[in-house]
């Protein structure tokens, strides 16, 4: 089977196991995701690993090549927008891609036990969670029920945007994605250590609902954003 190429190259739907113990695995995993998104955008999807054979192959164990910490928005289905299938992605979703202990524990499980080499924070334009937090901050009215926990988790990003003089909603979303990347690395010593060792990378991406495209807005290591930009 072929090994994924550099960021920006087209890949085969079948591949060798891509784990954190392979040199350059974070970059290879990112290349695989971006190639899948290009296929989705151009309506040339392969729909790999979505048949009975794949179902049987992964029944006993899983080796996902990327963790997706995404917003729960119904239009943000990771396996579809990245053109992947069963066993490829380890997906954790919350409104506004907010991160608490359960989310961090899930990410640490994938990175440390399953040896997944890439973590993606996936947000999107017109995010309802960011809009709700923005309204609550403007009016001082706390949302009902447990929605308040989502709003509270987004507010630090809103304050950061205010301090920077940013008022555009989608620019605030980008700040919130980047803030989530920073918060995850600051809250998980294990994840930070894997990134420092080069065995994992954390990339923040924003998805355009109408166009279907993803773009990187933050990364650790930071040079991955420049690599993606040059490959576009």
Image (cartoon, grey):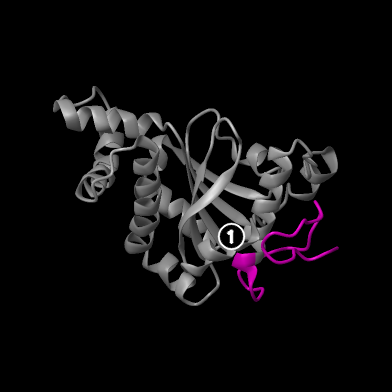
Dot 1: element: helix
Tell me which corner region of the image, top left, top right, bottom left or bottom right, holds residue 167.
top left
* Magenta stretch: helix, strand or loop mostly: loop
Residue 51 in the image, given as x and y percentages of width and height: 82, 38
Q: In the rendered image of this protein, does residue 28 appear above or below residue 88?
A: below
Residue 229 among those drawn in magenta = no
Q: In the rendered image of this protein, does residue 118 appear above or below residue 69?
A: below
Q: Residue at x 51, y 61 (%)?
A: 225
Q: Residue at x 79, y 39 (%)?
A: 44
- Rate crowding at label 1 as few (under 14), some (14 to 19) or many (20 or more) other CA atoms within 10 Å: some
Residue 54 in the image, given as x and y percentages of width and height: 80, 45
161 or 157: nearer the viewer: 161
Residues in magenta, as a range: 1-27
The answer to whether any part of residue 86 appears in the image is no
108 or 59: nearer the viewer: 108
Q: In the rendered image of this protein, does residue 113 appear above or below residue 86?
A: below
Residue 2 among those drawn in magenta = yes
Q: Residue furthest top?
A: 144
Quadrant including the N terminus = bottom right
Residue 14 in the image, given as x and y percentages of width and height: 81, 54
- Left or right: 53 with respect to 208? right
Residue to which mark 1 is pinned: 228
Q: Residue furthest left?
A: 140
- Left or right: 59 with respect to 177? right
Q: Residue at x 37, y 43 (%)?
A: 171
27 or 16: nearer the viewer: 27
- Left or right: 87 with respect to 53? left
Quadrant including the C terminus = bottom right
Tell me which corner region of the image, top left, top right, bottom left or bottom right, holds residue 117.
bottom right
């Amino acid at each position: 089977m072929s090994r994924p190429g550099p960021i920006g190259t087209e890949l085969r739907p079948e591949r060798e196991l891509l784990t954190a113990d392979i040199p350059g695995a974070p970059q290879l995993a990112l290349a695989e995701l971006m190639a899948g998104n290009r296929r989705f955008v151009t309506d040339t999807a392969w729909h790999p690993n979505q048949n009975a054979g794949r179902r049987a192959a992964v029944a006993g164990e899983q080796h996902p090549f990327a963790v997706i910490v995404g917003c729960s928005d119904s239009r943000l289905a990771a396996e579809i927008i990245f053109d992947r299938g069963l066993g490829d992605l380890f997906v954790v979703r919350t409104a506004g891609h907010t991160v608490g202990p359960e989310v961090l524990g899930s990410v640490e499980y994938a990175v440390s036990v399953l040896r997944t080499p890439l973590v993606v924070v996936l947000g999107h334009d017109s995010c309802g969670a960011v809009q709700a937090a923005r309204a609550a901050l403007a009016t001082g009215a706390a949302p009902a029920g447990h929605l308040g926990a989502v709003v509270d988790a987004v507010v630090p990003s809103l304050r950061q945007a205010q301090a920077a003089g940013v008022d555009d909603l989608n620019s605030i979303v980008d700040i919130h994605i980047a803030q989530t990347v920073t918060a995850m690395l600051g809250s998980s010593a294990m994840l930070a250590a894997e990134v420092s060792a080069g065995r994992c990378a954390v990339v923040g991406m924003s998805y355009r609902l109408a166009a279907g495209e993803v773009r990187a807005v933050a990364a650790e290591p930071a040079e991955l954003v420049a690599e993606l930009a040059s490959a576009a």
